[in-house]
Amino acid sequence: MTGSNAIRDRSGMEIVGKAFITPETLEGDLLKLAREGQQEAFAQLYRERSDAVYRFALHMSGNPAVAEEVLQETFLALIRDSAGYDSKRGTLTSYIFGIARNRVRKYVAMDREFSEPDQETPGDTDLLASLTRRETIEMVRQAVLNLPGVYREAVVLCELQELSYEDASEVLGCPIGTVRSRLHRGRAMLLVKLKAMKKSKVAAV
């Protein structure tokens, strides 16, 4: 399909036409139609979810090539695993991020427990909102990449991807209380790292 309504993937390949599913359509119905071979349904699903999956993989790995691979593998698995998603067990969003998380872990070998920081520094709940101005975006990104994996996941999902605690809990496979704890500690560690990076930057000038 060609024309102004065509949607293209990151490589420029045309994958879709007009929006196929209305906002009232259940998420599961959209996925079901995509799995049945409806290209418009798949295209809408890709259009609505691909950027978030790519950003998640990029924040977790720090590698655009890995993020692209994770994006493609996530959607292939989403379409092929017809029995995987169950709306009674969680949202489609958490299911998709769960797939992406497994793919990222495969690439960056995040399969071990990380040591906890020696001490906690009070976190600022508006930390990312106040620090991710244009001149500090790269600094924040590097600081996030330097967080231990379990805390990085919580920060990326809840802060950068703005998932609810419930959805993050489903993605990470842990209780909501654990998500809150990891997020609190991750914010504290992030603040410490950013302060150290800023101090180092000033000293280098």
Image: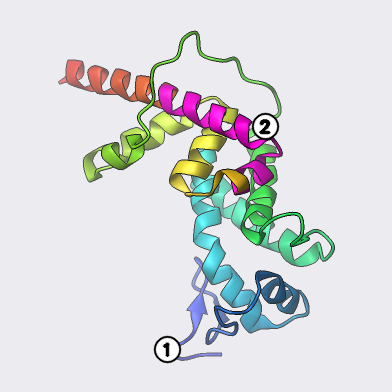
Q: Position of residue 98 (x, y in %)?
A: 68, 48
Q: Is residue 80 left or right of residue 62?
A: right
| Of the image marks 1 and 2, the number of the one nearer the N terminus | 1
Q: Quadrant location of the C terminus?
A: top left
Q: Is residue 47 above or below residue 94?
A: below
> What range of the chain is rendered magenta?
167-188
User: How many discs appear?
Assistant: 2
User: Is residue 170 covered in magenta?
Assistant: yes
Residue drawn 66% across the image and 45% down it? 171
Residue of label 2: 109
- CA distance separating discs 1 and 2: 42 Å
For the point 58% across and 69% down, which residue is it?
Answer: 46
Q: Quadrant of residue 38?
A: bottom right
Q: Which mark is residue 115?
A: none
150 in the magenta segment: no
Q: Residue at 57% of width from left, 43% of height from top?
A: 165
Residue matched to label 1: 4
- Rendered position, 133 above or below 94: above
Please, which residue is most extreme toward the right here? 83
Residue 63 in view of the camera:
no
For label 1, the SS is loop
- Can you say whether 92 is above or below 193 in the image? below
User: In the depicted view, which residue is nearer to us: 161 or 99?
Assistant: 161
Q: Position of residue 177 (x, y in %)?
A: 61, 32
User: Which scheme is used to colour this image of the protein?
Assistant: rainbow
